[in-house]
Image (cartoon, rainbow, N blue to C red):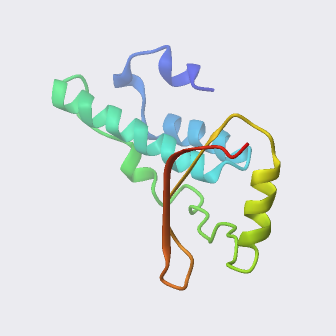
Amino acid sequence: MFTRISNGPISEVDAPLMLDVLRQIEKFGAVNMATRVAAHCSAVFRFAIAKGVVKYNPVPDLRGALKPRIKGHHAAIGTDELPEFLATLVSVEAGMFLQVDNVDLSCHACITVKRAPWPA
């Protein structure tokens, strides 16, 4: 799908072509990815405008044509689940480093472990 915009000169990329490419990404259910790709393409167009290669950035005109970005909260571990989670982490034998930086445990207690060796 990106070959449609990468094989030709940037001056030939217009709003309908960009919209088609971004909708192909949305079709896979990757709405947030389509938004990020649009932002990257817009940055490329801004650079091309600064270099005098193109005169117009079609990406901002597509803002209302794309699906809205999916917003919401990400999964989180509650303070009551944290001891079991940490015990499970310790039980896994792996040569890894644990880096927890300023984790707020909702009781205003912060712990910081930086580059600590994984417990054996």
Find residue 72 and report its horizontal and vertical position in percent. 62, 71
Instruction: Name the image quarter holding residue 63.
Output: bottom left
Q: Vertical placement of 98 versus 43: above or below?
A: below
Q: Is residue 53 left or right of residue 3?
A: left
Name the residue located 41 percent from the left edge and 38 percent from the top edge.
Answer: 40
Q: Vertical placement of 28 versus 113: above or below?
A: above
Residue 102 visible somewhere in the drawing: no
Find residue 118 and report its horizontal and vertical position in percent. 65, 43
Name the residue located 57 percent from the left edge and 77 percent from the top edge.
Answer: 105
Image quadrant in which the N terminus is located: top right
Nearer to me, 120 or 29 = 120
Find residue 108 and report its horizontal and vertical position in percent. 48, 83
Nearer to me, 15 or 99 = 99
Q: Residue furthest bottom?
A: 107
Q: Vertical placement of 55 versus 113: above or below?
A: above
Name the residue located 42 percent from the left edge and 45 percent from the top edge.
Answer: 39
Residue 8 visible somewhere in the drawing: yes
Instruction: Name the image quarter holding residue 85.
Output: bottom right
Name the residue located 32 percent from the left edge and 40 percent from the top edge.
Answer: 57
Nearer to me, 12 or 77 = 77
Image quadrant in which the C terminus is located: top right
Q: Is residue 66 left or right of residue 42?
A: right
Find residue 61 and report its horizontal and vertical position in percent. 39, 52
Callout count: 0
